[in-house]
Image (tube, helix red, strand yellow):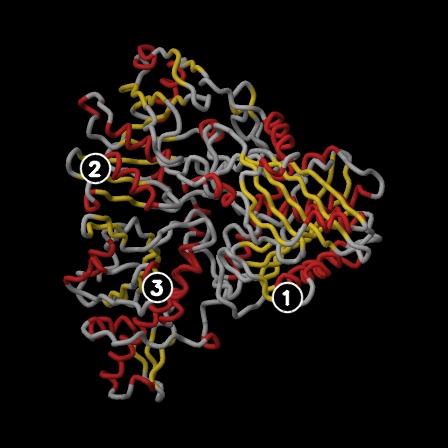
Amino acid sequence: MSGEIRLSRRRFLQYAAGAAGALVIGIGTAEAAQRPVPVSLLGDAWSQVGPYLRVAQDGRIFIGVRDPDNGEGTATSLARIIAEELDADWGNVVVESLGLGVEPGNGEPKFTYGRQRSGDATSIPAAWADLRQAGALARWLLLQAAARRLGVPAEQLRGESGVAVAADGRRIAYGDLATAAAGLDPPTSPPPLKSADRYKLIGQAAGDVDARAVVTGTLRYAGDDNIGDPVVAVLARCPYPGGSLDTADRDAAGKVAGVYAVVDITPEQGQIAGMAAQTPALAVIAADTWSALKGREALKATWKPGQAIEPGSGDLEKKALELFDNDADATSTVRNDGDIAAARKKAARALEATYVQPWVAHATAETPNCLVRLDPDTSITIIAASQSPRQAYTVVQRMTGFRPDQIDIRVPRGGGGFGRRLEQDYIAEAVAIALAKKPKDIQNRAVRVLWTRDDDLARDYYRPFAVHRLNASLDRKKAIVGWHQRMASPSALAGRSTPADRLWQSELAADALPAGLVPNFRSDYFALDSQLARGEWRGSPHVTPTFASESFIDELAHAVNANPLDFRLQLLGDARQLPYNGRGGPIDTARMANVLKLAADKLDWSRWLRSENGLGIACGYVFGAYVAHAIEVSPAADGIDIQRVVCVADVGRAINPLGLAAQLEGATIDALSTALNLAITVKDGKVQQTGFKDYPIAPTQPMPYEVETVIVPSTAEPTGASVIGVPSAAPALANAVFRATAVRVRRLPLLRELARLR
């Protein structure tokens, strides 16, 4: 195949399948990963091929990556899984991002690439088995072709950096074998996988496949793509949840040079949250971004609040505390072991703490945007960074009525996701504008919908506000014998067809530690009412409750004059497996204890009692990964300085340690910045934050100079990485601040911000 041909995302598979002399390998969808992998090679069956690889005659190996990459390193890690089993030369690998794989199938859409979702630490676990099999199949076929050419049994050959090597030293490049391999019948059963001791790529550091393009500014994001000569649309949105338009000067907007039209956007009623436009809006369509923004300004739109005014955080906190006074008011009892009341009566000591956490935005570097081209009655093309292109398809199909083969959804690299791009409101807005009646001269032009930063902060799907009240009972040996945690929040699952008694699932993990470690344990969830949109945020549902529980454990250790590390290790107890009814279980207490000890050793925890600085530690079990943070802070005139941050992670087998370290570092900084600086506030029913000036992400001070990462060697099945570094970072910081101030002052204003203790 000619190296000069540039392959498109969606058409890559079809083109490759018809390429003379290319070996194309497909795999089953993620849903079919439990059974032997079905294989389709060249010919009429090309459309059955899922994520795949193609070995070209010129020696290059093209690998298609099914899951979106919004900076998680998905494209690199998934490609290396295939390349490892193939024994490919990584220098000859070309990684292509796949758009949505969908086609008609018995009246229902058939998703040929599987789940296609990213950002929730699922890509690697979901792909580990089937992508290895795809690489192994390609290697098997290539070695079979080499065996026939060399006249030796295939068992006497091995793959090595893109070359088939015989025992006598003869070598044939994979590119020279591609044509012959493409003509072979696949094996009747899956070929054997490589043993781990032969790995050359998995476990070795690799830079992100897009890294050079990112740092040189040549990477094309969704906002850089064009279809013809698109018009630009920016929206004036109602700032009140449940509100409506009051006045707008459409004529003034229309007189702005470059403005073509003003289109009304009305949210579809009865749709699941995140699957339709959030709020009433006016879309200003113009020749360019500047004209659209000036047109929006000229609208001078005013808005009316709805019947119910969104309460401020203080009102929500007050309501939560009232609910906590009566356990019968709990929306759900999430877990109930033993008898917490009896444990409290027998306790030598009982303690209580309350923690309040604010609304938090995602604030991705790349704000939401979408390019849409509608050919009426023919097809629609969407270009958008989405973490869930299958959900995007559902929105587009519902709004247009098109068949699967008429819908083309392309998913370029995104500038951050963190859960924001799991929502499809910005895509629904773009489709609505494309469908709207517009002036004839722009009716069939593509439309690019852009969000400004103030749009992004005012209309996010926020991490829910939360209040926690924790009670603990300790015996005379200072062991925790009773634990009762109450949590109240506006559930992120509200409005998503979730039964009331399951709303807690977006906010809590029923078996999260210390559940299973305390004989008398109860967890209650109280749903709060709010009209603000909310959704998944980096680390949900672990991030919010982990902050409360890990902070409370430190308070308990302080109350009984115990070393917080020793106190945690005593709580974990003997090495054992704890049942875990969630993704990644069971919990291995020995692995958790190990990451705690490693983090403590790296920070030199022996200084804990005598250091003038504050040392804090915390841990979390997140989707199968074991993570601990140890942090050192020093008091400063205006608060604190973060001196050192250590993050230790056990994710099972690490596919790309360099990428994993980057994810841990970024997640840690994100968590620390959020804990110290960030909160979304509501006044008079409206969100107050409009930009980074009042939502200051990661200022230079007091952020650490670096995050020291330790990755635990492991042969366990790999887990994901994108979110796991978040949950334990903020409580480790709070615990360090607590230690730095506990001896002299029980509370500081800064500590109250991190966790308002009562």
Q: Of helix, strand and loop, which one carries label 3?
A: loop
Q: Disc 1 versus disc 2: distance between alpha carbons? A: 53 Å
State the CA–CA distance, disc 1 to disc 3.
30 Å
Is 124 or 639 nearer to us in this picture? 124
User: Residue at the location (35% across, 22% down)?
Assistant: 292
Residue 507: give x, y in percent of width and height.
53, 43
Earlier-in-chain disc, 1 versus 2 = 2
Q: Quadrant of the C terminus?
A: top right
Q: Can residue 386 be seen here?
A: yes
Amino acid type, label 1: Ala
> Dividing the image into 4 quarters, which one contains the N terminus?
bottom left
**Label 1 crowding class (10 Å Cα cut-off): few <14, some 14-19, many 20+?**
some
Q: Left of 11 or right of it: where is 294?
A: right
Q: Secondary structure at mark 1?
A: helix
Instruction: State the image coordinates of residue 570 (x, y, percent, origin top left).
Output: 73, 61
Q: Which residue is mark 1?
A: 590
Residue at 69 percent of width and 38 percent of height: 354
Q: Amino acid type of disc 2?
A: Gly
Element class at badge 2: loop
Look at 67% across and 56% down and name the residue there. Answer: 518
Counting from the top left corner in percent of width and height, residue 644 is at: 69, 50
Query: Type of residue at label 3?
Result: Ala
Quick one: label 1 or label 3, which is nearer the N terminus?
Answer: 3
Identify the mark nearer the N-term, 3 or 2: 3
Residue pointed to by mark 2: 401
Q: How far is mark 3 from mark 2, CA to CA? A: 31 Å
Compare residues 732 and 324 and report the one nearer the observer: 324
* Quarter where residue 692 is shown: top right
Residue 693 seen anywhere in this rendered image of the structure: no
Q: Position of residue 330 (x, y in %)?
A: 57, 38
Question: Residue at horizontal 48%, vertical 77%?
Answer: 197
